[in-house]
Image (cartoon, helix red, strand yellow):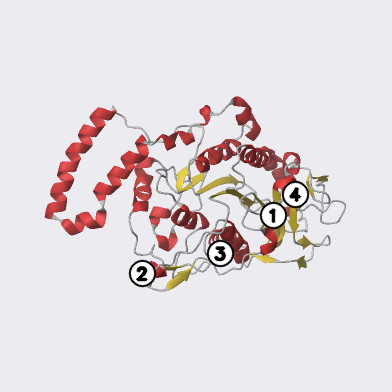
Amino acid sequence: MESVTLSTTRRRFCLAAAASPFGLTVGQAFGGDDSRPREGKAKSLILLWLDGAPSQLETFDPHPGTEIGGPTRAIQTKVPGLAFAHTLPKLAQEAQSLCVVRSLTSKEGDHDRARYFMKTGYRPIPSIVHPALGAVCGKELSGEQLKLPPYISLLGKDERTGGGYLGDEYDPFVVLDVAKPVPDLSSPVGKDRRDRRFAALDVIEKSLSKDHPKLAERTNQGSRIRQALELMDSPQVSAFDLGKEPESVQRLYGQSPFGKACLAARRLVEVGVPCVEVQLRGWDSHANNFNVHNRLCADLDPGISGLIADLRSRGLLDSTLVVCLGEFGRTPAINGVAGRDHWNTGFSAVLAGGGTRPGTVYGKTSSKGSTDVENPTPVPDFLATILTVLGIDLHKEYIGPLGRPMKICEGTARKELLA
């Protein structure tokens, strides 16, 4: 796994302010105004990514007492008629804030391809790399006052999903351990000495710009250095400092790395970061499925329930969309080593806040384990719903690397999931 420091990611962040030839919308490319009124309520997205594909039957869609249910028990939530697996007792108490989708369908059943599909809305092809949802949020929702990177991934990243044709300035800024200070965000020397060093460097940069103007324009080095310094000096960096939170708030999220990252995500959206992804890995349960889910849900349950409760208590839930899911689900059939295999028809996701419809269950799966699904929700439609909640225009197009207009999303938002 890549260990990312500011020395390797500063370039990505600083490019965000520079115009990318692939970052133009069609209206901008041809001199028009493609701006539309922003309709969504949410200003930011927190994506809780359950990498490896969790079982819907051991999380949000249990079928106890049936052949496919296994030993997983069901518990009632705060929403009448809605049951979760016994692995999620704290989240069950937050169900009145949740919009549960039980009918996701994907055309991809391989982990790598399914991750790409779920995060971009497009199936992978060799000729183009599409931007991930977080990259689109970073481009469309960043405010002028934001000094931090617009797309931040905590505890990991997916190697194939990032800025895509929007450019690597929209790749996620990765922080692998939120319990430690983010590397390279502070100067090894005092501010006065640092400023003298950069003043001397500025003399060299101006000389370079004078003698090699095209090179200076292409690299945009001076502007990037200034933005890096603004980042290092910005009070927004303190969003990474979890020690500033009261002990009672820290306990709310649990003491696992995932829980701490969920708390960091709340602090980051509070200072204006448009998209924060938090990864919880290890759900690929071809064997020992039930033990895997008992262990991982012990971290997931306080993390997601604490996040939702904390956002609501601070008045941030209406402006923050929380989405929790993996790349696909798990088979209703239990295999010979007490595991469940890949299943891309009728798996689950949870949404909260941001203008989604609370206390809602959408879709239904068969208790017999068939592929019959009520209200099937293809991946592009699910992403279109997320983008709509975020107020991002589904009709907007970017100019791709081959000079072709590229739609942000080809799906249709499901109005039943919107408040």
On the picture, is 339 further left or further right than 46?
A: right
Cα–Cα gap, marks 2 and 3? 24 Å
* Residue picked out by circle 3: 121
> Could you tell me which secondary element the residue under label 1 belongs to?
loop
Residue that appears at 50% across and 46% down: 153
Counting other residues with Cα less than 10 Å from the Cα at mark 1, is it few (<14), some (14-19), or many (20 or more)? Answer: many
Kindly report the distance in space between the C-alpha atoms of the residues bearing marks 1 and 2.
Answer: 37 Å
Question: Do the residues under discs 4 and 2 have CB atoms within 8 angstroms?
Answer: no
Residue visible at 67% across and 56% down?
419
Q: CA distance from mark 4 to mark 3?
A: 26 Å
Which residue type does callout 4 highlight? Glu
From the top left corner, tell me how far across and down residue 177 is, in percent: 50, 37
Q: Mark 1 vs mark 2: which is more N-terminal?
A: 2
Q: Secondary structure at mark 3?
A: loop
Badge 2 marks a residue whose secondary structure is: helix
Q: What is the x, y in percent for residue 22?
A: 38, 64
Q: Earlier in the sequence, mark 2 or mark 3?
A: 2
Residue assigned mark 1: 357
In the image, what residue type sits under mark 2? Answer: Ala
Q: Residues within 10 Å of mark 4 (few under 14, many from 20)?
A: many
